[in-house]
Amino acid sequence: MKPHHIFMLSAVLVAAQAAAADEATPDPKVLGTTEAILAYCAKIDPASESKYRERIKLVTQGASDEELAKARKSDGYQEAHQSVDDFVAKTDEHHAMKACSD
């Protein structure tokens, strides 16, 4: 992963968390992006998995289980999640660890 990709991954995560914090129910695309990034980070950094789970809780705070289930079933969520999955599949884990730790 090139250095500017690391910055982009980190920036997307920060922006997604900030956007989600302003609403009780996060936008499905924001939620899909955020959860995909954090799931990937937890996969490559199992020692910090609890930290990533806490970040997901922050993003989903205030939303009901029903609202989250509906968002996760949406096309926007699925497309955003898949897009991140496709991107990180091409990522060097060493560089991704840096992005996840930022």
Image (tube, rainbow, N blue to C red):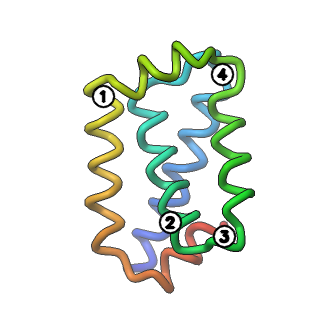
Q: CA distance from mark 2 to mark 3?
A: 12 Å
Mark 3 is on which residue type?
Ser
- Would you name the residue on which mark 2 appears? 7
- Would you name the residue on which mark 4 appears? 22
- Would you name the residue on which mark 3 appears? 101
**In x, y percent, where is residue 78?**
30, 36
Mark 2 is on which residue type?
Phe
In the rendered structure, the answer to whether residue 83 lies left or right of residue 92 reads: left
The kind of secondary structure element at disc 4 is loop
Return the mark for residue 76.
1
Task: Report the mark closest to the observer, 2 or 4.
Answer: 4
Looking at this view, is 14 or 57 the one in front? 57
Screen quadrant of the C terminus: bottom right
Is disc 2 in contact with disc 3, using a CB cutoff of under 8 Å? Answer: no
Task: Report the mark closest to the observer, 2 or 3.
Answer: 3
Mark 4 is on which residue type?
Asp
